[in-house]
Image (cartoon, grey):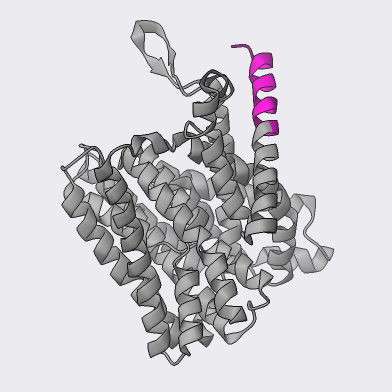
Amino acid sequence: MTNSELLLRLLLQLTVILSVCRVVSYFGKRYLGQTDVVGEMLAGIMLGPSLFGVIAPDLQQWLFPKIPIIGGASQLFPNPSMSILYALSNVGLMIYMFLVGLELNTDLLRNRAKSAGLVSIAGIIFPFILGAIAALGLFGGGDLFSPNITPWAAALYMGASMSITAFPMLARILQEKGLIKTQLGTLVLAAGSLDDAVAWCLLALVLASIKSSINVAIIAIGGTLLYVMFMWFAGRRLLRFFSYWTRRDGEVTLQTLTFVLIIMMLCAFYTDFIGVHAVFGAFVLGTVMPRGHFAESVHRHLEYLTSSLLVPIFFVFSGLNTQLGLINTPQLLALTVLIIAIATCGKGIACTLAAKQSGETWRSSLTVGALMNTRGMMELIILNIGLEQGLITPTLFSIMVIMAIFTTVMCSPLVNFLIEK
């Protein structure tokens, strides 16, 4: 395939991806009260083998060719068209996670430390324990986990996957409902940000534990701890010059934004090089960047392009890996229902009871539980990392995607009902 053919294929792919995502998001928001993220998640599934591949399998395979190319000595190489989409989706993920880190308000943790800590601990411990137990029970009993990982690595990964909360979606829902500056909104945002930080740390440990060499694992874990400590204690001070440049120029200039992106790429390169996913480096960098006018300006410059172009590519790429047809037996259907129940009980109910224990009313506590139970894009990120790194099989990936969609879709209607009640 020539470069010209690759470009034409890419342009057509992006046209289809953006069009379907916008149409599905529009109808989901207007008639079902869902956020754009939900529509994009569903659009990704629709463009994959689960729907588009059933209706027009030849056309779907031509547009999004998953079959590898056979090279010399019968070697298999990924289709270059999909490699381009994969690279674009990961660049979008890095920028998106950088913006998520940039949005984290550490003052929330100080202002509502006790309540947020209680809700966050409940939202981590209980789903983690239930997820780990489920993984140990399922390990070796079917085509769910890679044979190359240990039961404890599977348990750690499953627990981390169950513990995640969609912090960006929380912020978007609270903003749309006018709750982001309320006591309830502050509590949920603080707990959600802490949950995500812990889940990413757990994921880093999982990625380190699957390495074949103890030296590689030590490099991954030690390099991650060194990176986090350096960025938290030294990076925050070294990066203050961005605030000075912004005050001097009155706005984030093209040169300043370019420098920010260069640093972000270097941080992502470092964490990927030591054996941890690149998005982790971008996320940590975002958390230590200066706040105030600088952060608001950077977010404003990067948000629209990332959300409108790069993020939908990630959702579609996830959809291409989701094969709902793999869940084709009563046992797998029952397992899917069980995973959804474990996720909802472990996260939603635990956070509801923790919020009530911290002094919230039952209505507010139920709202906290519904919001904390949503997984959204953060779950898809962890699932894609697990599939890419060979932790889970496409079957378990598809089951977990269904769980992520279910817990995300149920959030907005529940919150609307509880607020308007």
Image location (x, y in percent) of residue 379: 44, 54
Q: Nearer the viewer, residue 15 or 155?
A: 15
The answer to whether residue 274 of the structure is visible from this angle is: no
* Image quadrant in which the N terminus is located: top right
Q: Nearer the viewer, residue 244 or 416?
A: 416
Q: Quadrant of residue 128?
A: bottom left
Image location (x, y in percent) of residue 102: 60, 63
- Please give the range of residues in magenta: 1-15
- Tell me if 98 is positioned left or right of 305 in this view: left
- Tell me if 79 is positioned left or right of 303 in this view: left
What residue is at 62 percent from the left and 84 percent from the top?
A: 182
What residue occupies the far right of the structure in this picture?
A: 250
What residue occupies the far top of the structure in this picture?
A: 72
Q: Quadrant of residue 179?
A: bottom right
What residue is at 20 percent from the left and 40 percent from the top?
A: 142
- Tell me if 211 is positioned left or right of 112 in this view: left
What residue is at 22 percent from the left and 42 percent from the top?
A: 149
Question: In the rendered structure, does residue 4 fall within the stretch colored magenta?
Answer: yes
